[in-house]
């Protein structure tokens, strides 16, 4: 059995890695392709994954086949084409960290997958079937994708869809929108970027855009990624915001959205898709955002995915916030203790070698209050900020 099977593109992302001695850009060949990026992240988390797609019978194709096996992704659904070369993408990183893509895909092996080559066995054995829109740009891959979806829906699998819109790969914008709406109409889980919502619906408000999508889709969970601004989950009548994990070490955003998507699927695999509460949606977004943040600090995607321990360490660090506070009077201490009792989890005061429960008035009075103290909140929430500012020494 497989937890997730994904169909789509597996290609080489050429990412600039410095310049030659004479000033020419030097590009590094990184294994990539959105569906396999998702699978690579899930495999790092210990899930059984399988890929369905096509590469060329060339050096790049063989490299990709070897790579996914090394990453723990089953290659049973990978087909090699002797007549068409592996698809290539050159990724140009812009000054603001965004990317520009140049594709060499006319023809490209990924879009030559046929319906007859789709592994029915892998689809029948998976829990979630994941796909994107790039396999819908051309025949025969479009028919192969729709055939695979029909098999997955007939077998009662959860369907996950990420449009991953790349303008240069579509002949007409109308064709692209029709394909994305088709995918949206098929899925249970939709991950879509903020700019894709605006492009698809023509609406600037995410809430209005999601409402327009919900009118044409049975998707039960919709995730909107906002880049450096975080993410939003829409589930039933619930809307939950996930704060970003910003890093001054970000060098390449390639694969960040796919990593986020994998983080969401990880949560669904563990908790299901029924009766999710706001706290659970928040946990989902925290994990997915943290994973995506880590991958932006590395070149490439498939080989750069973080493990569970690394993600949880980043999350734990973000929740453990420390502030300098001044408690200059008895009344101030009493008010402070009452406020601290409103905060969930452990709240500590640090003074040299002493660590005191900030919810204990007697413990606080045992400290020297003539100097600022360090307040440590282990389960930080943005809603605590106004409380802390009342006592801040900064």
Image (spheres, rainbow, N blue to C red):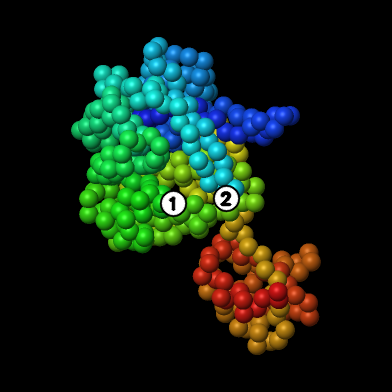
**Which dot marks residue 361?**
none
Answer left or right for 314 relative to 53: right
Asked where in the image residue 232 lies, by quadrant, the reply is bottom left
- On screen, residue 12 above or below 215: above
Label 1's element? strand
Q: Residue at x 34, y 36 (%)?
A: 170
- On screen, residue 387 above or below 160: below
Q: Which residue is mark 1?
A: 225
Label 2's element? loop
Answer left or right for 181 relative to 301: left
- Furthest residue to the top? 82
* Residue 98 position within the rendered picture, expressed as x and y whole percent measured from the top left: 53, 46
Front-most of residues 163 and 344: 163
Q: Which residue is mark 2?
A: 96
Front-most of residues 99 and 34: 99
Residue 316 visible within the image: no
Q: Residue at x 22, y 32 (%)?
A: 150
- Distance between the Cα atoms at labels 2 and 1? 17 Å
Asked where in the image residue 145 lies, by quadrant, the reply is top left
* Residue 324 position within the rendered picture, expressed as x and y whole percent measured from the top left: 70, 71
Query: Badge 1, how many Cα within 10 Å: few under 14, some, many 20+?
Result: many
Asked where in the image residue 264 lies, by quadrant, the reply is top left
Q: Earlier in the sequence, mark 2 or mark 1?
A: 2
Q: Quadrant of the C terminus?
A: bottom right
């Amino acid at each position: 059995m497989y937890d997730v099977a994904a169909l789509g593109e597996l290609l080489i992302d050429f990412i600039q890695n410095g310049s030659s001695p004479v000033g020419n850009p030097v590009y590094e060949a990184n294994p990539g392709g959105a569906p396999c990026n998702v699978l690579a992240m899930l495999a790092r988390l210990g899930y059984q994954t399988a890929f369905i797609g096509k590469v060329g019978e060339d050096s790049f194709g063989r490299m990709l086949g070897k790579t996914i096996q090394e990453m723990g992704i089953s290659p049973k659904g990978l087909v090699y084409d002797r007549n068409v070369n592996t698809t290539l993408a050159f990724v140009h990183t812009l000054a603001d960290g965004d990317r520009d893509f140049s594709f060499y895909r006319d023809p490209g092996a990924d879009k030559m997958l046929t319906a007859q080559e789709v592994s029915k066995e892998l689809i029948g054995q998976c829990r979630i079937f994941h796909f994107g829109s790039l396999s819908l740009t051309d025949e025969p891959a479009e028919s192969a994708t729709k055939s695979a979806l029909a098999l997955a829906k007939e077998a009662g699998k959860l369907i996950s869809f990420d449009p991953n819109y790349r303008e240069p790969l579509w002949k007409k914008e109308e064709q692209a929108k029709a394909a994305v709406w088709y995918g949206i109409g098929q899925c249970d889980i939709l991950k879509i970027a903020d700019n894709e919502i605006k492009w698809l619906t023509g609406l600037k408000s995410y809430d209005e855009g999601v409402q327009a999508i919900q009118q044409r889709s049975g998707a039960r969970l919709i995730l909107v990624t906002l880049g450096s601004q975080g993410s939003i989950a829409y589930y039933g009548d619930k809307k939950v915001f996930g704060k970003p994990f910003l890093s001054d070490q970000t060098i390449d955003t390639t694969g960040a959205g796919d990593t986020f998507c994998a983080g969401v699927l990880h949560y669904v695999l563990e908790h299901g898709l029924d009766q999710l509460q706001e706290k659970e949606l928040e946990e989902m977004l925290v994990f997915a955002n943290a994973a995506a943040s880590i991958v932006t600090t590395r070149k490439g995607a498939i080989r750069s995915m973080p493990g569970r321990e690394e993600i949880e360490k980043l999350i734990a660090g973000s929740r453990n916030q420390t502030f300098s506070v001044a408690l200059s009077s008895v009344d101030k201490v009493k008010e402070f203790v009452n406020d601290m009792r409103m905060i969930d989890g452990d709240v500590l005061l640090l003074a040299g070698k002493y660590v005191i429960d900030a919810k204990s008035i007697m413990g606080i009075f045992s400290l020297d209050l003539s100097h600022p103290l360090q307040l440590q909140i282990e389960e930080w929430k943005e809603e605590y900020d106004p409380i802390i500012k009342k006592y801040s020494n900064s």
